[in-house]
Image (cartoon, rainbow, N blue to C red):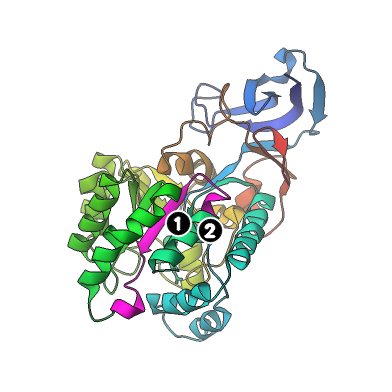
Amino acid sequence: MVSVLVDNIGELVTNDAQHGDGAPLGLLRDAALMVEGDRVAWVGERRFAPAADTHVDVAGAAVIPGFVDSHAHLVFAGDRAQEFAARMEGRAYSAGGIQTTVAATRASSDEMLAGNVARLVAEMQRQGTTTVEIKSGYGLTVSDEARSLAVAAQFTDETTYLGAHMVAPEYADDPAAYIDLVTGPMLDAVRPYARWIDVFCERGAFDADQARAILAAGAAAGLHARIHANQLGHGPGIGVACEIGAASADHCTFTTPDDLDNLAQSGVVATLLPGVEFSTRSPYPDARAMIAAGVTVALATDCNPGSCYTSSMPLCVALAVREMRMAPAEALWSATAGGAKALRREDIGRLEVGLRADFSVLAAPSYVHLAYRPGVPLIHAVYRGGQHIA
Ligand code: NIG
Ligand code: FE
């Protein structure tokens, strides 16, 4: 197998606390990283680097693990720019806009849907994302949810069935019948393509009992749970996530101290989506308080045409630092290792021997610049499984 030494790294973030001063980022200075095939073969100070077949000299730049964007809704058609403009003129965000995207998605061809996902995944890769989770949820019929997940599965292993995004318009007068569909024929149809199941547990979408029933049906079919929780107000979503042992409770915009204790005790990851608060002018969650309470925090984009149409993990890192009181080191950890935990993945999110060689070379001497220089394209080169992808 050919070995490649990425050499002359000014600052290497490994997320392996065995390196450096014992902090979670596992920082190494004057470092090198050896890749063999799609794996990390060696990590350390460059003066100890083993011989390799080829060298890539990054001239003192920082190298970070690839971002793990553990929450994105990429299978959709159209956009909702006018809704965004109206919101910026004072109208409040309401999840009702989802139906606009449902209509556009149903009217779209498989090829158009796949083309849109390809465009967004490429955008993400250029910004340092090497793993993305992709949800359905804009189909809301058996065939539209199944094809949404079939499209998603062309791009990632981290596919999530979100038939319970909203009650489909045809079932507005009979939500119980829609839940029967979501937990019955629709679940059967998506199963070959889905790893996860998700529910929008919120007033106006699905309540706690409905969420429990939907996630239990998913679990019986072998799908693992994650939940849209506490986005628009205080509610039962986080409680349900902790009770059933979901991998992650996502959004967590409105929390009580009990919610934080519950997350910390149960080990459910809180996936924060600061682009949503930014794009909907909502209050940011207090990540500082969550970390102080012992909660594991992940950061993701939530890329979707309604509440947050950014594909940029660097923007989310900058917002988390500026608006959610995370330290730059915490935000970077949450956007990489934290995302991997939210997806229960042990092979990504860190740069350790044997793990997948997913990393970015920055056009900066330190990862701190991701927050310090917001909006600047600092992702210089991106490698996934050892291959240069962007
Ligand atoms: O995660 N909360 C529900 N779903 C999306 C928004 C979907 C939309 O507005 O189209 C979210 O924010
Ligand atoms: Fe979402």
Residue at 55% x, 52% y is: 317
Vertical placement of 332 versus 210: above or below? above
Tags 1 and 2 in contact by the CB under 8 Å rule?
Answer: yes
Mark 2 — residue? 319
**Closer to the camera, 320 or 234?**
234
Vertical placement of 274 versus 108: above or below? above
Structural crowding at the residue carrying mark 1, measured as other residues with C-alpha within 10 Å and reported as few (<14), some (14–19) or many (≥20): many
Amino acid bearing label 1? Met
Q: Identify the element where label 2 is drawn.
A: helix
Magenta span: 152-171
**Residue reaching furthest to the left:** 209
Q: Is residue 104 left or right of residue 209?
A: right
Residue at 27% x, 58% y is: 183
Q: Quadrant of residue 351?
A: top right
Residue at 75% x, 23% y is: 5
Vertical placement of 167 versus 111: above or below? below
Mark 1 — residue? 324
Q: Which numbered disc flags the more N-terminal residue, 1 or 2?
A: 2
Q: Identify the element where label 1 is drawn.
A: loop
> What is the count of numbered marks?
2
Residue 16 rendering spot, x and y as whole percentages: 52, 27
